[in-house]
Amino acid sequence: MLGEIIKKLRIARGLNQVQLAQKLDVSKQTISNWENNNILPSVEMLMKISRFFSVSTDFLLELDTREYIEVSGLSQTHLAHIQQIINDILGNEI
């Protein structure tokens, strides 16, 4: 559910509810309500959450369960290194 995803993303960033609330310009109670699935964020807020955590809205809504890593601004050499690390972890051979 959306609330669980927001909570996991928040914890992965090392943020408490107050800190996330400050970043998104909402109250701590709003964050708590989202995480407990008492209310849903508006479409505009869903987009803001998506941008803040660098995930797609589809990911937040569990329409796309793929994981992404933000790599904008890295050189092709850096990207190749990251891809090789991923391949090594997955045991893929190229």
Image (cartoon, rainbow, N blue to C red):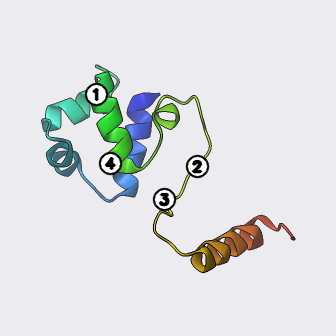
Crowd rating for badge 4 (residues with CA inside 10 Å; few <14, some 14–19, many 20+)? few
Q: Position of residue 6 (x, y in %)?
A: 38, 39
Q: What residue do we see at 28% from left, 22% from top? A: 42
CB under 8 Å between discs 2 and 1:
no
Question: Nearer the observer, disc 2 or disc 1?
Answer: 1
Which quarter of the figure is the C terminus placed in?
bottom right
Residue picked out by circle 1: 44
Residue picked out by circle 4: 52
Residue type of the residue flagged with mark 3: Glu
Question: For the residues marked 2 and 1, what is the alpha-carbon distance in whole angstroms?
Answer: 22 Å
Residue type of the residue flagged with mark 4: Phe
Residue picked out by circle 3: 70
Q: Position of residue 92 (x, y in %)?
A: 83, 66
Image: 22 above or below 41 = below
Question: Which label belongs to residue 67?
Answer: 2
Q: What residue do we see at 16% from left, 47% from top? A: 18
Which of the marked residues, 2 or 1, is nearer the chain's N terminus? Answer: 1
Which of the marked residues, 3 or 4, is nearer the chain's N terminus? Answer: 4
Crowd rating for badge 1 (residues with CA inside 10 Å; few <14, some 14–19, many 20+)? few
Which of the marked residues, 2 or 4, is nearer the chain's N terminus? Answer: 4
CB under 8 Å between discs 4 and 1:
no
Judge from the rendering whether residue 68 lies leftward or rightward of residue 39; answer left or right.
right
Q: Secondary structure at mark 4?
A: helix
